[in-house]
Structures are given as structure tokens and as C-alpha cells.
Amino acid sequence: MAEDLQITEGSKEEKYQSLIPQIKGLVDGETDLTANLANICAALKSTFHFFWVGFYQVKEDQLVLGPFQGPVACTRIRYGKGVCGTAWKEAVTQLVPDVDAFPGHIACSSLSRSEIVVPVMVDDKVWGVLDVDSEALAFFDETDKKYLEYLCDEIVAKVTK
């Protein structure tokens, strides 16, 4: 297990390409879900300096806050509400360049300006979501979408089982 991340300088894609194998190393052999999700959040925040990064898990009719890095957050989000609830309802990544323009956006922090939310699918159902926020407008792009979806599909989904 790695104790320190080796953060690569370079493009966003190069950083993801370096980080993903390190995240695999962090979670490999660890069976505790909370520990794994917490380390994934810490690795993403350390590498990309996101404003906020965390997981919400589906519990009955709500998304409930799980491990995260950043300022305090909304604890519960209803199905179909806000960016996270929409990602859950539609089971598709939400890439939002300006959260103020998103219908029904839930402002957990007024400092958040853009957001990407990736559903975590387990057994063909949304288990939860990975939510990432930035203080900059239009911060997230197709590179983030590609690698965060890979992370959720290939690593997070496996540690939730």
C-alpha cells in the first residue's frame, strides 16, 4: 500500500494517468469501505486541488453524505434534486460548467461555481455518486468525465461490494 502520492506535474490527463494506478494501490486489499472512499477523496483533492470532493450513498429515498474532503456539505439530497439527485435519477454523469445555471441547483456552498457528478453503478443500480466541485466556472471537461467515470466504474464500484 502506498503511503504517499506521487503527484505528477503536467496536463490534467497526465495527472489522472498517474493517479489512477496509485488509487488502485491504495484500495487493493483494503476491505473497509469508509477507508477506501476517504482515501480516494483525499487522493483526488491532493492531486487536483478541487474545492470539494466526496461521495453520497443511496439510502432509501435519499443520497446521504459519505466520506469527503472540503468544507461542510449538505447531508441529505432527495432523488432528482440538484446536480447529485439528477445524476442519481438519470444514472448519467452531470457535467455542469455553471451551477447557477443548473435548474434546481442545491447550493451547499456559495463558493462552488462548477460541478461534475458521476453515478457509481453496482449491479446495474445507482449505489451512490461521486460529487466534485470547483470554485472556478467551467473547470471540468471531458477529460475529468472520462477518468472520473473510469474511477467510479473500475475502482469504486468494486470496493462497494
Image (tube, rainbow, N blue to C red):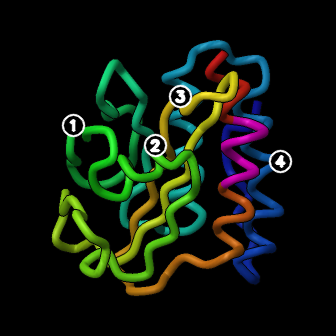
Magenta range? 149-155
Q: Secondary structure at mark 3?
A: strand
Disc 3 versus disc 4: distance between alpha carbons? Answer: 23 Å
Quarter of the figure with residue 97 = bottom left
Q: Residues within 10 Å of mark 4 (few under 14, many from 20)?
A: few
Q: Is residue 125 above or below residue 95?
A: above
Residue 21 falls left or right of residue 152: right
- Asked whether the residues under the numbered discs 2 and 4 touch, taking CB atoms below 8 Å apart as contact, a structural biologist would say no
Q: Is residue 21 above or below residue 27?
A: below
Taking depth in this image into account, of 141 and 40 the one nearest to the observer is 141
Quarter of the figure with residue 71 = bottom left
Q: Secondary structure at mark 1?
A: loop
Magenta stretch: helix, strand or loop mostly: helix
- Asked whether the residues under the numbered discs 3 and 4 touch, taking CB atoms below 8 Å apart as contact, a structural biologist would say no
- Type of the residue with mark 4: Pro
Q: Residue at the spot x=26%, y=70% of the render? A: 103
Q: Earlier in the sequence, mark 1 or mark 4?
A: 4
Q: Earlier in the sequence, mark 2 or mark 4?
A: 4
Q: State which quarter of the image contains the C terminus.
A: top right
Q: From this viewpoint, which residue is outermost toward the bottom?
A: 137
Quarter of the figure with residue 119 = top right
Is 152 inside the magenta-drawn segment?
yes
Q: Residue at the spot x=65%, y=65% of the render? A: 145
Disc 3 versus disc 2: distance between alpha carbons? Answer: 9 Å
The residue indicated by pointer 4 is 21
Q: Which mark is residue 127?
A: 3
- Type of the residue with mark 2: Trp
The residue indicated by pointer 2 is 88
